[in-house]
Image: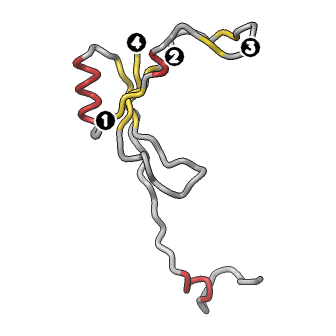
Amino acid sequence: MTARIYKPSKTAMQSGRAKTDKWVLEFFQNSATKREPLMGWQSGSDTQKQVKIKFSSREDAIKYAEKNGINFQLAQPKERKIKPKAYADNFAFNRKETWTH
């Protein structure tokens, strides 16, 4: 039973940063999924894959995993790089590339 502890990144579909402040403990899949012959759905006997536990801090997630004897891999989040920009820079006289419509 191995789990992954990570901090989710911002979704690519929206510009908001909601649901990125919590740490998540998620289990890896232990057995392969099978295709059901009647409906064609994917099924499996591993129910741990469905479990996602959210924590307010990384230390809380690590404590929980150690207390319950869960092997885990810790994924460090990548820091966001912000490039400060101003709208007026689009019309600056010393602009590097040409500005056209």
Work out whether mark 4 precedes mark 3 in sequence or the reverse, and give the earlier one.
4
- Judge left or right: residue 83 versus residue 74: right
Q: Secondary structure at mark 1?
A: strand
- Judge left or right: residue 61 versus residue 28: left
Residue lying at the far bottom in this picture: please name it. Answer: 93
Q: Which residue is mark 1?
A: 55
Amino acid at the residue labelled 4: Met
> Where residue 14 sits in the image (x, y, percent)?
56, 54
Q: Which residue is mark 3?
A: 39
Name the residue: 75% across, 8% down.
38
Q: Tell us which disc is closer to us: 1 or 2.
A: 1
Q: Tell us which disc is closer to us: 1 or 4.
A: 1
Mark 4 to mark 3: distance in Å?
30 Å
Q: Tell us which disc is closer to us: 2 or 3.
A: 3
- Quarter occupied by residue 43: top right
Q: Which residue is mark 4?
A: 1
Q: Secondary structure at mark 4?
A: loop
Amino acid at the residue labelled 1: Phe
- Quarter occupied by residue 73: top left
Work out whether mark 3 precedes mark 1 in sequence or the reverse, and give the earlier one.
3
Q: Across the whole image, how many numbered discs are drawn on residues? A: 4
How crowded pointer 1 is (Cα within 10 Å; few <14, some 14-19, many 20+) is rated as some
> What quarter of the picture does the N terminus occupy?
top left
> Where residue 52 sits in the image (x, y, percent)?
42, 27
Q: Which residue is mark 2?
A: 29
Q: Secondary structure at mark 2?
A: loop
Name the residue: 45% across, 59% down.
81
The reply to whether dot 1 and dot 4 touch (C-beta < 8 Å) is: no
Amino acid at the residue labelled 3: Met
